[in-house]
Image (cartoon, coloured by chain):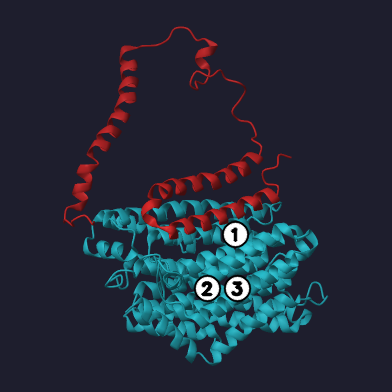
Amino acid sequence: MTPEMVWVGLQPLSADLVLTAGLLSVLTADVLMPPGAKRVLGWGALATLITAFVALIVLEPTGWSFGRSYHGDAFATFVKAVFYIGGALAVLAGLESSESRWPRRQGEYHLLILASTLGMSLLAGAKDVITLVVAFELMGVPLYVLAAWSRDDRRGTEGALKLLLSGGVSTAAILYGLGTLSGLASSTQLELMANHATMMPTPFAAIAAAIALAGVGFKLGVVPFHFWVPDTYEGSPSPAVVFLAVGPKIAGLVALVQVLLAGDDGLRLASWAPLVALATLSMLAGNLLALNQSNAKRLLAFSGVAHVGLMLLALAMGTQDAIASLLFYTVAYLFTNAGVFLVVHALGGDGSIASFDGLARRNAGLGMMMLVFLLSLGGIPFAVGFWAKLYLFLVAWGEGLGWFVVLAALVSVLGLFYYLRIARAMFMNPPADPTPVKVDTSTAIAIAVCVFGVVGVGLYPGPLVAAAEVAARAIVP
Amino acid sequence: MRRPLSPGLADDMLEQWAPALVFLAMCFAAPISMLIGAAVLRVRARTVTPARLDSYECGEEVDGSAWIRFHPRYYIVALVFVLFDVEAAFLFPWAVSLEGAGWIALVDMFVFLGILLLGWAYAVKKEAIKWQ
């Protein structure tokens, strides 16, 4: 094997290699550096993510790696870009607060974000069940540590334990289900596994698929596997929630795309009933449970459950258009959800809705930006959330899922009600503590990036739609 | 390499696993039949000695209660142990098949070992395995 052949084999993984190199450098630097100078590690992590992003855009990694276990294509590039931006936002959010609140552990924080992002990035092109599961765990294990960051806080440990237990059980379920399917097909390639399962639909294979789906459902936090989501969000440190709430959810959907659309006739389970049922349940229950929350973190957690439900429906339809709308939705979800949790982080405090009282008077800019994110979550025109919902609803209507569209549109109105509860607290209620809210520079930059994404794509969605269509074509021929 | 596909794959599997099912049934049958037999025949020890009430663990004499607090340090040592355990699991098949795999396999393994070594150095430097 010549060096050129090695390079051709590794080229699809070039962005991941950048990430790995950066991860190992930050890890080494963490132990070598004196305790006072660890802020550099955060900048190193940020530089790593930006370099990986640039490598992704410039090199356009395509082709097979390691036999047929990894494939770089437009789809992988698209979701990797989403993951890298999500990771960079979390690093930015943690730069200042990790220095002031946990100076001894700030290297670890950035290290865990990088490791988890690397796992998601590998997931984006995994075509072999072993690669898929290992990447999924590389994403998941750092999250347990991030969630358990506030060791002395009761709610922190409770949320982390819930994540750990449900995460462990769901990993076992995924392994059992996919392992059985792999055994039935006598192959570890997802494509052959999917072909075998569609050609020979035995009850045994159906049970295995259902168990694996339940496992991923836990990770995604879809109803009825959602109970850990609000507790974990509430107990985790707020910069980590910025990460937790976005990347892993999208990564779970990507894993489902890899498994369900792997075969020759792409799931052929167009509007597969179990997925549609999970999607509908999540969309309904997420919105209803969010109605009565008094804590913004919990409210946004349930709203996230509802949004994941909508994305799951796009996946369930499984057509090229549906996947394009799913990919568009992931970008809307990234900027909007990272944005709201960044504001919650910037505000500090316990995240209760009362803590938003009079924010417009304490920091007008922050209040306006939060309003932009809330409107995008609610799907108000000219924010990216509107186009994401419209795109998805149009595709669903075309697929004959009109009942879902009507239901989702009705529930969205309900959603506006609870999003605007936060807005009312910000603009109508008098502040309990009139001191201005100070936002550190790096968090402010991260929020600005999110606003730019929400408004920019909202006003000019064309290029992103085109990119999503190209990416969808790579996964559904 | 792939097994021929037959419509009765689930049946085939059932046939292959039949001995395991029989074994499982025997596992349940043995203790249940003993319990029933003891109840029917009224077999019962007449004396109760302290040794009879003790927990049995391979003939070891019991030393204190099992409900004690374990030092959490064990957990970190166990984690670092797993590092080497996994390494060994990969090293053995690699060593056996190295001859046919060529120099690229050699390089691959050293990259892998290098990353593990870095993890180990991290653990040492963070004083994870120092007993405090």
Q: Position of residue A183 (x, y in %)?
A: 30, 53
Q: Amino acid at mark 2?
A: Ala
Classify A236 as above or below A441: above
Find numbered disc 2 in the image and state the secondary structure of the residue it sits on.
Answer: helix
What residue is pinned by disc 3? A49
Spatial separation of the CA atoms under disc 1 and disc 3: 26 Å
Cβ atoms at labels 1 and 3 below 8 Å apart: no
- Chain letter belonging to callout 3: A
Find numbered disc 3 in the image and state the secondary structure of the residue it sits on.
Answer: helix
Residue lying at 23% horizontally and 57% vertically, measured from the top left: B2
Give the left or right position of residue A463, taking residue B4 as reference: right
Q: Position of residue A22 (x, y in %)?
A: 61, 67
Q: Quadrant of the N terminus of chain A?
A: bottom left
Classify A444 as above or below A232: below
| Residue A292 can be seen in this image | no
What residue is pinned by disc 1? A232
Q: Residues within 10 Å of mark 3 (few under 14, many from 20)?
A: many
What residue is pinned by disc 2? A15
Q: Residues within 10 Å of mark 2 (few under 14, many from 20)?
A: many
Q: Colour of chain A?
A: cyan
- Chain letter belonging to callout 1: A
Q: Quadrant of residue A327?
A: bottom left
Residue A146 disc label: none
Q: Colour of chain B?
A: red
Q: Amino acid at mark 3?
A: Leu
Residue that protrudes farthest toward the top in the picture: B46
